[in-house]
Image (cartoon, grey):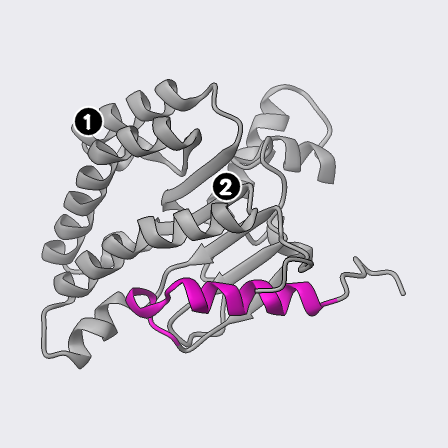
Amino acid sequence: MDANLKIPTHVGIIMDGNGRWATLRGKKRSYGHNAGSNNVDRIVTHAFNRGVKTLTLYAFSSENWARPKEEVDELMRLLKVYFKKFIKKVLKNKIRLFVMGDMSKLSPDIVKIIEEDMEATKHLTDHVLNIAINYGSRSEIVMAVNKLLAEGKEVTEQGISENLYTAEFGEPDLIIRTGGELRLSNFMMYQGAYSELYFTDVLWPDFDEGELDKALSSFSERKRRFGKI
């Protein structure tokens, strides 16, 4: 990969395709979610090694509760396992963990682990791994507006931005979606107003370091105008 490439500071990834990946192999969807979970460390490590400072991963949307209970339970189990082992890795590699989304619907044991991980890493500044769980962009915007109104403040673009989950991390320069779908699915719609978008047919468990490099190279070739000429 060209060392002169422009690397985005903040990358968001919609990790899609786990279920289809498993179905293609004659397995249950849970098999795909497990494979997708195992892929997270690989991509997180590679992204940070490439110079990305903040990586936001869409792990579980507020709409995902509508999936079959067996699948939701498996996703929650995988999240719990990931956060339990996460702390050792991040402290060693100076990665701050942040979770955005409404955690009130998560089980208390998962919330406890997440809060402990966030507290233990809040002083780390080299990299930020921001994981979206029970997250929806529309509800996030409503939350920000209601907070401004409750404080008696005028609702402005800047005010909304300052009250989003990502306020201290900045807006994503690049949003990647795996799995072939061409939509944002309620993911950082406010923050992503001028994000570069990259879509690939590669299913998330197969999205390896080389595929991430393709996305980063594509970003580097683009001219970001932000509405200007």
Asked if residue 157 is positioned above or below residue 58 in the image, the reply reads: above
Asked if residue 86 is positioned above or below residue 122 in the image, the reply reads: below
Q: Is residue 183 left or right of residue 229?
A: left
The image quadrant where one finds the C terminus is: bottom right
Q: Residue at x 50, y 41 (%)?
A: 140
Q: Position of residue 72 (x, y in %)?
A: 18, 52
Q: Residue at x 41, y 68 (%)?
A: 178
Mark 1 residue type: Pro
Find disc 1 in the rendering and name its residue.
108
Q: Position of residue 62 (x, y in %)?
A: 35, 49
Q: Which residues are magenta?
A: 202-222
Mark 2 crowdedness (10 Å alpha carbons): few <14, some 14-19, many ≥20: many
Q: Residue at x 32, y 25 (%)?
A: 117
Find disc 2 in the rendering and name its residue.
140
Q: Name the one closer to the observer, 39 or 3.
A: 3
Asked if residue 78 is positioned above or below residue 13 in the image, the reply reads: above
User: Can residue 52 be found in the magenta stretch?
Assistant: no
Q: Name the one closer to the observer, 210 or 222.
A: 210
Asked if residue 106 is positioned above or below residue 44 in the image, the reply reads: above
Q: How far apart are the two marked residues, 2 and 1, measured between alpha carbons?
A: 22 Å
